[in-house]
Image (cartoon, rainbow, N blue to C red):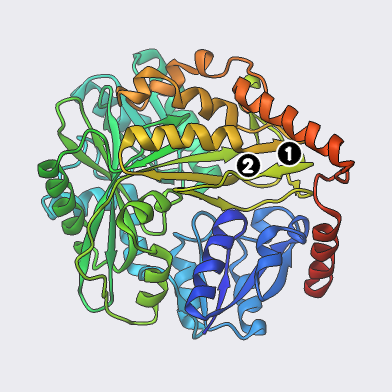
Amino acid sequence: MKVLIANRGEIAVRVIRACRELGYSTVAVYSEPDRAALHVLYADQAMPIGPAPSRESYLRIDRIIDAAKKAGADAIHPGYGFLAENASFARACIDEGLIFVGPSAESIDAMGSKTESRQRMQAAGVPVVPGLTEPVRSFDEIAAFARNVGLPIMIKASAGGGGKGLRFVEREDDLHPAFERVTSEAQSFFGDSAVYAEKFIASPRHIEVQVLGDQHGNLLHIGERECTLQRRHQKVVEECPSPIVDEALRQKLGDMAVRAAKAVNYYSTGTIECLMGPDRQFYFLEMNTRLQVEHPVTEMVWGIDLVKEQLRVARGEKLALGDIKPSGHAIECRIYAEDPSRNFAPSPGLIRYMNLPQGPGVRNDNGVYSGYIVPVFYDPMLSKLICHAPTRADAIARMRRALIEYRVEGIETTIPFFTALMSHPDFAAAKFDTGFLDRNLAELTKERSGNGSVDAAIAAAAILAFEESQQVRLPENGDSPWKHAGRAEALKDRL
């Protein structure tokens, strides 16, 4: 089978690796600034799909379908983001005789609307956050809801997701400006200005449950993930399992997630996201009808490959996981090309040198390399660092060690921020909610040397001393000359 990956960056590389292990050939697609991207070099074949703006390349259904047909692909894997939860894209693939590696278009549609999904969940007996069950476009309806349930509330884009198109409102004077802002963002990001509102749950945790189903009616849950640590409603650190979920609660969450997925006849990988209050009462938030960014922590703990399972399910195979059981604890940090000391300002540019951490229990889902120029056009996530160990305390210690080893020169990254977070006593004690990072940013973004520790500065000095003693000079792009030459040859073969 030949699989085209309709995405870029680390997730495209991740899918290519799974395909290669299954013996499938791969096709990458790329925009003009991504001609030398890592996923392009890793794939067996690469097809151009347009200029830099996503709307003219990675969001162009017609160009991706055309690339798949020209390359002779049998299937399309959408990754996450871009077109991954676009029902029209799923239908277009099927209409053109291509396998869509994901759920049915009907399931995507059902869960794509936040208000429709809430209606379906209520009908299935799944607890939801008190709120509107119909999308609205009138401020008067939002104001009436706020009067009925009381402030604070959350106003959200009905077709939204990914932290876009939502506002927290705790003062009546802020209600109308927030409504205007969310409707504007909803139209801009999702092409639909409809919004809805929910009662705000104070000091919540964000817990999500991994589900996996096949096209023969088999569906199961594969544990939960802790995704509470967020900045501006965007997840930055994830864990599996959640440090506050015991076995009894895990079973309740799992049963709820399976019931929710069955309500829309779901198959493939998917995630049921929940809010959990301090009273440990949980509420359905939304369903992501795709592979999650944070799927590696589940893979490390449960010992499965979710991307391979996606591909097998897409081919019509039955689930055959056997009696899988969790083992240990895993933590993931999303490494971004951002400067934490400057309010996380984007930091595109040339990566002069990169050294990825290694060793027992360390995994790098990486999408860049030394000599790569990080473009300004896309999400700034460079890679994901995942550490697995027998206990949560061991996993934190392993992550601290790995972050010290992680070297990126030429651009700023969020590595110092994560180094500080791993040493925070409240993180170690799992005492946090969704507002934790925003409340503690000043402490977590203080200027630090190297990668956030004296050890990193010492390591850098040792590397420099070794190079001096060996009379070794790395080229300006930070890479070895023979590796650089090999990459250039590989690039010529693909462009």
Q: Is residue 338 left or right of residue 177?
A: right
Q: Quadrant of residue 321?
A: bottom left
The amino acid type, in three-letter code, at marker 1 is: Pro
Q: Specify whether 28 is left or right of 495.
A: left
* Labels 2 and 1 touching (C-beta < 8 A): yes
Camera sees residue 179: yes
Q: Earlier in the sequence, mark 2 or mark 1?
A: 1
Residue 52's disc number = none
Report the residue marked by disc 1: 348
Task: Identify whether 9 is placed above or below 149.
Answer: below
Query: Where's the C terminus, which quadrant?
Result: bottom right
Q: Residue at x 39, y 21 (%)?
A: 436
SS for dot 2: loop
Classify 10 Å Cα crowding around label 2: few (below 14), some (14-19), many (20 and above). Answer: some
Of the residues shown, which amino acid type is indicated by label 2? Pro
Q: Which x, y percent locates residue 319? A: 27, 74
Q: State the image coordinates of residue 318 (x, y, percent, origin top left).
A: 27, 79
Local secondary structure at mark 1: loop
Q: Position of residue 54 (x, y in %)?
A: 65, 55
Query: Based on the displayed image, in which of its 4 quarters is residue 340 positioned?
Result: top right
Q: Which mark is residue 380?
A: 2
Closer to us: 46 or 233? 46
Tell me the distance, in whole angstroms, between the alpha carbons under discs 2 and 1.
Answer: 8 Å
- Front-most of residues 215 and 143: 215
Does residue 235 appear in this view? Answer: no
Mark 1 residue crowding within 10 angstroms, few (<14) / some (14–19) / many (20+):
many
At 61% from the left and 25% from the top, the residue drawn is: 455
